[in-house]
Amino acid sequence: MFFLKCLHKKYCEPHSPIPWAALDPESLKTDMESGIIRASVGSRLGLAFLVAAVFAMTARADFGPKPNDRQTFSVTLEGDQLPDVRFVAAMLCQRDRAMEGPQNMGAVIPGLEETLPPEDSDGRWTNASYRWGGKGSNGQVQFNGFYGDVPKVFRVAVYLPSREKVFLSNESTTHPLLNRYTVDLASDGTATLTRNESGRWLADPLVGLAQRGILFALAVTLVVETLVVGSVVTALKKREVRTRMAATCAVANLITLPALWVICLIGFWMGGLWTGLLIFAVQEIAVVLLEASLYATLGRIGWRPAFGVALVANAASFLLGIALG
């Protein structure tokens, strides 16, 4: 009933005549154009927000760090350079049953079974499941293309043709981002396996942040960057664009953070800590430039303040994420 009365009042009751002489054609045209622009910007922001939200929600929250797919080893003989230019190595793990040899293109060590320790409650030592690796040269050897995850606990066996001898290392553990090791062979057939801990002060927080998940990182980013954007807008005395800037910040991060997250995880997984950081730096530069352009065009605060707020906001969110990780 109330709805019908409203319709009747709007369309059936007489209205007071419009004073056409009081209307300015130029102001009417300006008002129409500004209304169209506001509607266009609002509809685009709404559509971008919807698409970005769907993209962020469909990204796997448990897409966390896995051990690097390429494990690299430097091999020495009692601290000195190997006498063999070429040698053979194997990465070993414990299984319920023995593997006849490395899968696909992995190198085979002759007489490996005779040097392995006896089976215990954790299984027997045998070849890990990697597709390629083990053909060493000039003191370097790699293993990559693992079926499933890289083993958390492993040993390394090295065969030197010049001595016709297999050297077996101690047990060690893998790290999601630190993938470089040293294997020092001893004359008694043992070997000392150590991991290069360079950069661990940064690697551990990055792993901790990745383990918290993409939704945690997204929440931290939205809170921090929205606060930074609001502070800059207030300092510039442009309160009229505060809502638009906040919406732009939210949409930009809903788009950029999931993309950066996935690309960086792939970079860290394929290249390790330092390669992953290089990819991350390139991605961050692109994100800062993109967000700065959005703040300058949609927020209308000028290019210099837009670049400054994008740079400070991204740096603050990254540092806080590392601290919380």
Image: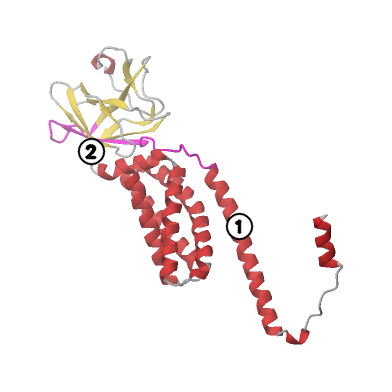
- Give whichever of discs 1 and 2 has the lower sequence position: 1
Which residue carries the number 2 mark?
Answer: 196
Please name the colour scheme applied to the rendered image: secondary structure
Q: Main secondary structure of the magenta part?
A: loop
Report the amino acid beneath label 2.
Asn
x then y, percent, for residue 202: 28, 45
Q: Quadrant of the N terminus?
A: bottom right
Which callout, 1 or 2, points to the residue nearer the camera? 1
Q: Toward which corner of the image does residue 169 lie, by quadrant?
A: top left
Residue 149 vertical placement versus 201 (above, below): above
Residue 46, numbered circle: 1
Disc 1 and disc 2: Cα gap in Å? 49 Å
Residue drawn at x 40%, y 25% as measured from the top left:
103
Report the amino acid beneath label 1.
Gly
Closer to the camera in the image, 167 or 69: 69
Identify the element where label 2 is drawn: loop
x then y, percent, for residue 72: 29, 36
Identify the element where label 1 is drawn: helix
Q: Residue furthest right?
A: 12
Instruction: Give, as a single range, the part of the protein colored magenta.
Output: 58-86
Residue 287 seen from this side = no
x then y, percent, for residue 277: 34, 49
